Amino acid sequence: MDQNNRRPGSNGNFAMSKETNHQSSSGIRTRVRNDQFDPKLNFSRGAGTFRFAAWQLVKWAFFRTVFPWPVRMKVSLLRFFGCRLGVGVVIKPQVNIHLPWKLQIGDHAWIGEEVYILNFEPVKIGSHVCISQRAFICAGNHDYRTVSMVYRNAPIVIEDGVWIGAHTFVAPGVVVGVDAVVAAGSVLVSDATPGSVYSGNPAKEVGRRWREV
């Protein structure tokens, strides 16, 4: 906590100031106004409050938990909430899917532990895809060039045969081409061409996946 925004309480401990100081130590005042942010602008949840609340309860009970519930049960629950899934899908524990009705997963796809799919806009995951542990598939964003930080969300497409490495970030609007590989810890902010290997921050093409015989 910033020392400038704290004041001593009656017991000698520090407490938050009731007034917010918008001026930095350099004397520059921020133009950002988070109080003007409109969560309904450029975003539709695609479901009512009851459905969303019900999904939150189901998600925390059966998906975010470390308990290894049967995959068939999790697949059935996702389908009940509107997710389109193929056959042979594997979903590991502690997966965080924000809106299942905006998610499509193909056949024999693997979703690893602690993967986070923030699908404010539709996310399509193809067949035979592997998304490794703690990858962040992020279809939500803010326009930092507006003072009210309006949403700037965009869908994500991960095509067949892709491998998204552990701790990888995939940005809104990205298309990951067939058989592409995004190495662990990379930040993918632009499209990945089919059959290529990407690495780094921002991720760049570093090679080809398949070696010609």
Image (cartoon, rainbow, N blue to C red):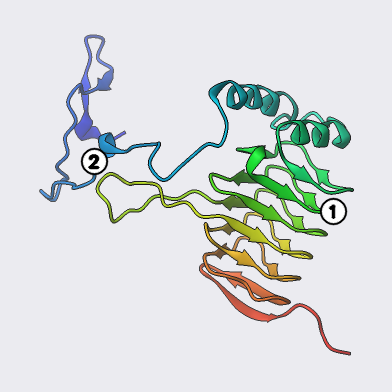
Instruction: Report which residue position mark 1 lands on.
Output: 107
* Total labels drawn: 2
Residue at image location 81% in from the left, 37% down from the top: 75
Which quarter of the figure has residue 11?
A: top left
Residue at image location 77% in from the left, 64% down from the top: 160
Image depth: mark 2 or mark 1 in front: 1
The quadrant of the rendering that contains the N terminus is top left
In the displayed structure, does residue 141 sit left or right of residue 25? right
Numbered tag placed on residue 146 in the rendering = none
Which quarter of the figure has residue 117?
A: top right
Secondary element at image label 2: loop
Other residues around mark 1 within 10 Å, as few (<14) / some (14–19) / many (≥20): some
Instruction: Report which residue position mark 2 lands on.
Output: 33
Give, as a three-letter code, the residue at label 1: Asp
Q: Where is residue 157 in the image (x, y as percent from the top left)?
A: 64, 60
Give, as a three-letter code, the residue at label 2: Arg
Secondary element at image label 1: loop
Please identify the residue farthest to the top as the structure is shown. Answer: 10
